[in-house]
């Protein structure tokens, strides 16, 4: 089997396994989750920074990140949840458990932010 076909088959198999696992806010996958307008807080990614750096929300609410920078960025949490690497668009995450969730842009480690969930 040509290399390209093997790669396609592998990707399809991985996607099928991941789909069978279900989803939650603790998934350790990068998922494209465009913001739907129902977010309790919005963080803008612009000028190599997250603004605001810290947001506070009640448990069960959603935070949306909106890209407005010309550089590629991502939003990556210590628990493995992460946005796709992208230059534009949006991504969101719902936080079901209270706690402090720190995140970083893996491409620019000086870009850091925090979500505080009450």
Image (spheres, rainbow, N blue to C red):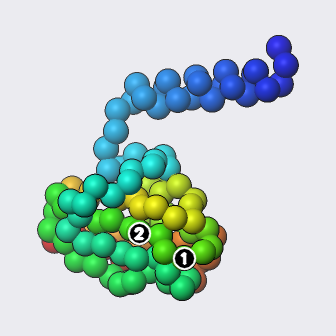
Query: What distance separates the C-alpha of mark 2 from that of mark 1?
Result: 9 Å
Where does the N terminus fall, quadrant-wise?
top right
* Looking at the image, residue 80 lies above or below residue 106: above
Q: Quadrant of residue 50?
A: bottom left
21 and 70: which is toward the camera? 70
**Total labels drawn:** 2
Residue at 73% across, 28% down: 7
Query: What is the x, y in percent for residue 35?
Result: 33, 58
* Residue 103 versus residue 21 in the image, above or below: below
Query: Is 75 situated left or right of 13 in this image?
Result: left
Residue 22 on image: x %, y %: 35, 32
Q: Position of residue 49 (x, y in %)?
A: 50, 83
Circle 1 residue: 69
Question: Secondary structure under badge 2?
Answer: strand
Residue 13: tell me if it is visible: yes
Kindly identify the residue that appears in the image at 42 percent across and 29 percent down.
Answer: 19
Question: Is any part of residue 97 visible from this angle?
Answer: no
State whether residue 4 is above or below residue 44: above
Image position of 91 (left or right of 29): left
Residue identified by numbered label 2: 66
Residue 31 location (% of width, % of height):
46, 48
Q: Disc 1 on helix, strand or loop?
A: loop
Residue 31 relative to residue 23: left or right: right
Q: Within 10 angstroms of label 1, few (less than 14), some, or many (20 or more) residues?
A: some
């Amino acid at each position: 089997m040509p290399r390209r076909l093997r790669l396609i088959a592998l990707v399809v198999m991985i996607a099928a396994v991941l789909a069978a696992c279900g989803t939650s806010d603790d998934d350790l996958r990068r998922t494209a989750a465009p913001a739907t307008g129902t977010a309790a807080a919005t963080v803008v990614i612009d000028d190599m920074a997250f603004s605001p750096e810290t947001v506070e929300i009640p448990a069960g609410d959603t935070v949306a990140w909106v890209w407005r920078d010309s550089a590629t960025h991502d939003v990556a949490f210590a628990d493995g949840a992460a946005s796709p690497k992208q230059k534009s668009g949006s991504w969101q995450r719902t936080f079901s458990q209270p706690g402090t969730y720190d995140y970083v842009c893996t491409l620019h480690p000086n870009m850091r932010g925090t979500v505080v969930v009450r």
